[in-house]
Every structure is written in C-alpha cells, then in structure tokens.
Amino acid sequence: MSVLSRLTSLPPLSQEGNQVKIQHAGSAALAAGLFAAVAGTAQAHGAVEFPIARQLQCLNDGGFWWPADGSGVPNAACRAAFQRSGNYPFTQYHEVAALTQDYRNPLAVRRQVPDGALCSAGDAKKAGLDAVSSAWHKTPITLENGKFRMLLLATAPHNPSYVEIYLSRPGYSAARSALRWDDLDLIHQASAPMPETIGGKKYYVYDVPVPAGRRGDAVVYTRWQREDPAGEGFYNCSDVTFEGGGTVPTFPWHEWGYFLGQGFAPKAGETVQFRVLGPSLSGKELVTESIAVTPDNAASHRWALELGARLNGIHGEQVRVGVRHGDDIHLDTRNVQANQVFLKDKDSSVSMSILSDDVPPVKPEPPVTPPGDYPKWPAGIGQYQSGDIVEGVDGKLWQCKPFPHGAWCNINAWAYTPGGKDVPPAEDQRAWRLAE
C-alpha cells in the first residue's frame, strides 16, 4: 500500500465542526481565528530522542559556536548542515515543524513538506538537515519481538495529537539522495497517549513494529501532528541501523523485553521485587532482588537504575539490564525506558512486581572488616554502597561515589574497576574515586 493511500485511511478529523465554522465565517472572524491558531503553535514542541533525530544529535555533539566556519563540528553530516543553515536547526531542535490546516489531506501535507525537504519539515532555514551524507549518526536498534521503543521528547506536550511513523524502503540510502515521500512506508500510526515523565521530562512512548527481515541502515521518519485549527506538525529524521542477521549467533544473551514496563510506577514506601524464573514447570527462582522505593530514588525512576546496576553487578552471569551495543550491554542512565532485560537462558522468564509497604526488602549484610582495614576489591561486590572504601587493584584506597555514579560500584567490569588501568579518564564515567 502506498503512503498516499495509507494516509487517507486515517480516522475523520475530530475538529471538523470547528473547521466548517471557520470556512463560512466572515473575513474578520477568519483572520482572528487564523491569528489565534498560529499563536497557539507555541503550545507544543518536541523531537524524537530515541532513536535520536538529526537535529538533536547535532545539538548534543556541539562544536558549532566556534570557529565560525563550523570546523569545530565533529560529525561531518552535522558540519555540512551547519555550513548550509548555521546553528538554527540545532538550537531550534524541538521546532522542526510545518503548519498544514488541512493536515488530514496527504496532498496538502506534501505541499507543505515537499520531497527532498522532509527532514527540515520544508523549512528553508533548516535545510541543512536534508544534507545528503553517509556520516549521519546511526542509532543501533535491536528489535524485541519485532518492535523497538520510540521516545518522543515533548518539550511542550499537546493532546489531542497523533503520530505517523515511517521507515525508509530497502535500498534507500541517505548517502545518495535526500528523503522523498515515495521512499517511505508507513509502519505505525497511533493517537498520542498521555505523556510519561522520565528524568523530569515529558515523553510520548511508542512500541513500533518493524517489517520482518529488516537489517542494516535505514531512516525512521516521524510525524507528530497536533489536532487543532493551526495544524502544526513536527517532522523528524532518525538515522538507524537494525542489528542482527548472520548464520552463526555470537551474542550470548537473549532479549526478554523492556526492563521498565509502561505504567509501572511504584511509589515511595513500596518495594519492587525482580525475579528470574527457570524454564522448568516448577518455576524455580534463579534470581531474586528487591529494592525499596524511597523519596530519594522515586523521582525519575532512579530506583530502576539502582536495581539495574545491582542486577548487573551481583547476577551478571544470568541476567543483564541495559542497551545492547554490538556484543556489549550497557545500562543507559539517561533514558531508563530504553533499557532491556537480557537472559543467559532463553527459556527463562522475568517477573517484576510491586510489594506492599509492609514487606521490607531483604538487605544483605555488609562485609565485616576491622577498623582501618578495607576489603580488597572485588571482595564483597554486590554489597557496596556510596561512601564505602575498598583497596583497589593498584593497592590504593578508593571510595564509592555518590549516586548516580555509585550505582556502578557493584559491577565487575574493566570500566568500573577501582585502580584499574582501563578505567575511563572522564570523571563522570567512574564508579570510584581515590579516598581522601
């Protein structure tokens, strides 16, 4: 089915009655209505954060304030966009938008956002986002049951609204041509749900199905359309790489599903219990971990990050929580919703539940050490808390940092080894710091 025919299958415009009144009103009323509609466009803004849209990735990369010629922009595609349009597309990352009053009419949409200008929403001042380049940052995506989870950052949410999510057809290459409507297939459309608060920001969250067999590079094209007289729609290009394929699997983990289910929101005073159940009919518990939700960690799902770090550190041989990058799995501390659960045994299952506040979590006893004597890392791993001191592999004393960095003190991996030679130099990547 073509994009055009799929667009026309959308449900009827809910504001049709209001449009009829505007069309038959006098010129003064019409002008006033249009002014109010345009003025209302400041009430909704947003951009796709995962998989990250071009303008947001370029904004995060930075380097466009100096030198003036853009030579400081690290990514070649973002540099080409800057040299064409300046920093305007980046600083206005949440306003890549077009006004189409007849927004249910696909021909009207195409007139406002024509072929070759889809990534800029037809805005000549943002045309750099349509640059033809092989260097656009590509978000790696591993499908879970044929789907991926999209996070649309709504800096100013608007309901009612809806999304249309498209995928470039096999054979399209962003290195050869700018995106056209005929390069796209509509793969998902839905009314906007109530936005979720993640990390203090508002998101629309969608689980997007992908046609079977898709592998390699593609462009995910998102249209977030307000349902109001102004007809403001937001258009985002997200460059992606669908991972997978090959005849010999090398990745030793099996994706079970997303770690934090939609609507799973425990309150302070409650306890979250995470279990991995074995494949037998008896449902033997292979992993059991609980975490108390407190006023300190309830906000922004911080409890989920703490629980994920604990699972990775204590039970990392059986379960991992994070985002896959090649053959590695890393806990994503920015977008907790992006983290998935990976199991070593494909026939096992996961259960995560909220216990009543009268069931206290089971806390392991901390390692007992004489005064002035500290455990030699990794002895006692899985029980470290912020402020604990250990003897690192270099013989020096190291102290577990405060949250969120301290959440990784229980991970036995090269990047989190106190005193290890491979610990990243960036201070924000360390779980440990030299004890004072």
Image: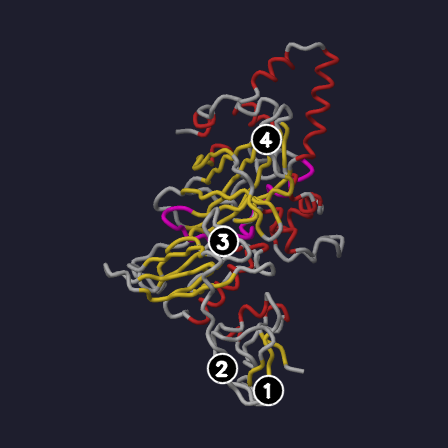
Residue 226: numbered disc: 4
Q: Is residue 143 rendered magenta in the image?
A: yes
Q: Is residue 278 rendered magenta in the image?
A: no
- In the image, taking residue 112 as reference, residue 317 lies left or right, namely left
Residue 338: numbered disc: 3
Give the mark nearer the N terminus: 1 vs 4. Answer: 4
Q: Quadrant of the N terminus?
A: top left
- In the image, taking residue 67 as reference, residue 118 lies left or right, namely left
Give the mark nearer the N terminus: 3 vs 2. Answer: 3
Which quarter of the picture shows residue 100?
top right
Q: Position of residue 11 (x, y in %)?
A: 47, 24
Foreground tag (1 vs 2):
2
Determine whether label 3 and label 1 are within 8 Å by CB. Answer: no
Q: CA distance from mark 4 to mark 2?
A: 56 Å
Give the mark nearer the N terminus: 4 vs 2. Answer: 4
Please give the name of the residue rendered at 60% of the width and 79% of the height, measured from the top-left corner.
399
**Residue 200 versus residue 385 in the image, above or below:** above
Q: CA distance from mark 3 to mark 1?
A: 36 Å
Q: Residue beneath label 1, please?
A: 396
